[in-house]
Image (cartoon, rainbow, N blue to C red):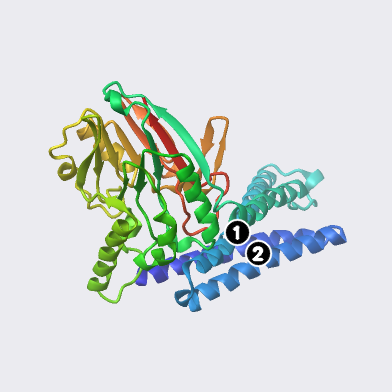
Amino acid sequence: MHRGLIFLLVVLVIGGLIEWYSYRALKSKWDNYSGWFRITLKSAFFLFLGLSVLSILLMMTAGPYLPRYINNFFFGFVMINFFVKIAFSAFLLLDDLRRIFVFTKRKIVPDESEENSKITRSDFLVKAGIIAAAVPAISYPLGMFVGPYNYKVRKENLKFSKLPESFRGLKMIQISDIHAGSFYDKEAVMRGIEMINQEKPDVVFFTGDLVNDSAAEMENYMDVFSKIHAPMGVFSVLGNHDYGDYRSWNSDQEKENNLTRLKEIHGELGWKLLLDEHVYLERNEEKIAIIGVENWGSGFHQIGDLNKAYSGVDAPVKILLSHDPTHWDKQVKKDFKDIDLTLSGHTHGAQMGIETHGFKWSPISLRYDKWAGLYKEGEQYLYVNRGYGFLGYPGRIGIWPEITVLELS
C-alpha cells in the first residue's frame, strides 16, 4: 500500500514538472503565432491535460466500481497526455542545453557584438517539438479505436529433422494473452475466433493470461472462446495474470478460490489445461509430446516446474507451452536441449511499435531480447505470440493482435 502511494506521488511530481516545462515553453511562443495556430495549440494543450486529470480522478474515486475496460480508457487518456508532453519536452530540452552551452561560452569568451542579445528558445525546435507531439496525439487515440481487434494471421513453417512422417503438414494455431476483462466489443472478439476456425487447425494452443485478475471476467465470453475447435484438441497453460497477483483480495482463500474457478473454466471451454505435465498427440501409432508448465518468468510469478512436466517424456519431437519467453533463455536452452519448440506470449509486443519489411522494433525490446515472432538457436525454436487481447492501454499501434499458424514439416 505504501509503495503504491509513493509510486503515485512520484508519477504526479514527474507529470507536474513535465506539464510546467512544456507549458512554459508554449506560453512564451504562442502569443507570436497566428490566431488559428495559437488557438489550436492552447486547445490541444489544455484538452489533453484536462482529459488526463479527469481520468486520474475518476480512476481514484469511481475506478474500483467500474468495469476494467472503462478504467483502461481512462488510463489511455493519461498515456496520451504523458507521451504528447514527453515528445514535445524532449525538443525543448535540446534547446535548453544549447542555450546553456551558448550562455557558458559567452561568459568564458565575451563577445561584445552579442553582449546585449537575448538567448531565446528556438522557433525551429519548438515547432519540431509540436510536430513530434502530434505523432502520439494522433496515433494513440487512433490505436484505441482501430487497433484492439485488428487481428492478423501470421504464418510460419517449421522444419524438424526428427518429425514423424504422420505429423508432416500438421497445422497448429497459437493464441495468447486474451485478457478477457479488457474486452468491450464481443462481436469483434468473435470475428477473431471465426478467423481461427477458418484456418482449420489440427490443434490449438493457448499460452496463458486468460484474464487480467478475476475468473469472473470470462463469464460473458464463455460462449465465444468455447467455439474454438480442432480435431486433436485445444491445450492451454496459465500466465502470470491468471494467479490474481495484481489486485487485492479479501482473503487468501478468496484468491485461491478464484484460481480454482479459473482452472475449471479451461475445462468448461473444452480446453485441456496443462499444469506441469505432458500429453501426446498421436497419428498412425506415431506421436509428438506437448509439455505445459505453470508460469515461469524472470521477475514474475514463478512456480512452473519443467522438470516435473518433462519427466517421462518419450517422443521424437517435444513442444513446450510456457507463457513467459524468458523461460527459454533462462532454463529451456540450457537444461532441456531436446525441447524442439517453445510457444510463449506475455510481452504483447508492448502493443505498440513498428513492423515493416522484416524490420521490427517496440519499446518492449528494451526489456525482452525475444519479444515477438520466431527465434531459433541451434535446433531449438521459440515463438513469441503478440497476444490476442490487450492490457492497460486499450489499443494497439503497429503491433497488432495475433493469430499464429505454425505448420510442421
- Residue corresponding to mark 1: 80
Q: Using the image, determine if residue 57 lies above or below residue 322.
A: below
Residue 202 position within the rendered picture, expressed as x and y whole percent measured from the top left? 36, 38
Residue 153 position within the rendered picture, expressed as x and y whole percent measured from the top left? 50, 40
- Residue corresponding to mark 2: 48
Residue 240 position within the rendered picture, expressed as x and y whole percent measured from the top left? 32, 55
Q: Marks 2 and 1: CB-CB under 8 Å?
A: yes
Residue located at (40% from left, 34% from top) = 406
Which residue is more in the foreground, 112 or 63?
A: 63
At mark 2, the secondary structure is: helix
Residue located at (47% from left, 53% from top) = 389
Which residue is more in the foreground, 111 or 22?
A: 22
Residue positioned most to the left: 312
Which residue is more in the foreground, 304 or 207?
A: 207
Residue 154 position within the rendered picture, expressed as x and y whole percent measured from the top left? 49, 37
Instruction: For marks 2 and 1, give the CA distance.
Output: 7 Å
Q: Using the image, determine if residue 78 lies above or below residue 292.
A: below
Horizontally, residue 29 falls left or right of residue 227, namely: right
